[in-house]
Image (cartoon, rainbow, N blue to C red):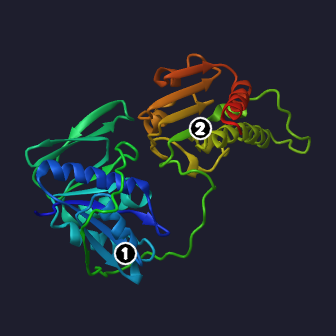
Amino acid sequence: MANKIFAYIDHFGGQVLPASWEAVGVARSLADQLGSGVTAVVLGHEVEGIANQSIEYGADQVLLGDDPELKDYRPELFAGTLSHLAAEAEVLILPTTSRTRELAGMVAVDLETGMAPDVISFEIDGDAILATRPIYAGKLLTKVVCREKRPQIITLRTRAFPKPEPESDRSGEVVRVEVVIGEVVTEVTGYKPSEAGVSLTDAAIIVSGGRGVSNNPKLTPPNEITDEKEQEIWRAQQGFALVRDLAETLGAAMGASRAAVDAGYIPYALQVGQTGKVVSPDLYVACGISGAIQHLAGMRTSKMIVAINRDSEAPIFKLARFGVAGDLFDIVPALTRALKERLGK
């Protein structure tokens, strides 16, 4: 049985991103329908353990490119090797991460084929895959297909598909492959950790704050803060402290709207939206977020949305399953206290 369905395994620091196992699960499902097999591609240095994990999660074969040159992600090396390997595939499936967005595009150019990004569902049409993805800031869904070119390259929206359960007794083949070393212009000088906390893209629960977190009239900034913008940021910091407390109580990730990021309240790494992180948690709590189209595009596929906003006409309420029209500075602390009592914290 030919293994024509490929799944790319993204990892960092020796840890596989959970979305990679979702990609293997989708590859397994498609392969079973098409009568094919699943080949996982693992690139890196000292990553044989990840190759073995890939078999447990559903791969029949693993192409392992293990080389000191691949210790750090550098797009030229990874794209060159992946393009060489995937040239024999019918379908190449990647999780959506900051690295794979770049990698998938480069491989598509190398192999002169098409790419369907941010896919949320599939169906089989002959020997082609119809992939459904959101367009127009998530307001519409479109089906895309690549009939002539191969491989069909697909990136998955994180948490849009179930993560398979590993089976320790599965067997498969690990094949070591040569790494394609070409011209490299990228240099990795080091890593700087982002703000600690639960990963936004992997989180089952997200609590986000918007520009409204700075609108607490009851707060008086310290006398030494006289600049109006600095006073606004100080108020926002107090508001985000409430958001953070609720997130920590729920074991959730903390997010923010673009308006809050642009205003300097919170780091860009926490932005949810079309130009930030696209998320699909089980629960999304929006605090002081009006619901601009850009933000809704990044979280509208959340399974349950709870909105807390003073403005009862805010667009976010049209998308929310539950809405509380009121002052977040009263509601969020009360909700946090009630949850801590219920959860015994």
User: Front-most of 317 and 221?
Assistant: 317
The reply to whether residue 115 is in sight is no
Of tags 1 and 2, the one toward the viewer is 1
- The crowding category of the residue bearing disc 2, from other C-alpha atoms within 10 Å (few below 14, some 14 to 19, many at least 20), is many
Residue 107, horizontal then vertical, whole percent: 27, 64
Residue 20: image quadrant is bottom left
Q: What amino acid does circle 1 point to?
A: Glu
Gap between marks 1 and 2 measured at Cα: 37 Å
Residue found at x 27% / y 64%: 40
Picture layout, residue 134 above or below residue 20? above
* 56 sits left or right of 305 in the view: left
Badge 1 marks a residue whose secondary structure is: helix
Residue 64, horizontal then vertical, whole percent: 30, 74
Residue 148, horizontal then vertical, whole percent: 10, 53
Residue found at x 48% / y 47%: 277
Mark sitting earlier along the chain (1/2): 1
Picture layout, residue 227 above or below residue 268? above
Q: What amino acid does circle 2 point to?
A: Val
Q: Quadrant of the image for the C terminus? A: top right
Q: Quadrant of the image for the N terminus? A: bottom left
Per the image, the residue denoted by label 2 is: 207
Picture layout, residue 233 above or below residue 180? above
Residue found at x 86% / y 41%: 226
CB-based contact (under 8 Å), mark 1 and mark 2: no
| Identity of the residue furthest to the right in this view | 223
* 63 sits left or right of 70 in the view: left
Numbered badge on residue 48: 1
Residue 144, horizontal then vertical, whole percent: 21, 42
Badge 2 marks a residue whose secondary structure is: strand
| Identity of the residue furthest to the front in this view | 169
- The crowding category of the residue bearing disc 1, from other C-alpha atoms within 10 Å (few below 14, some 14 to 19, many at least 20), is some
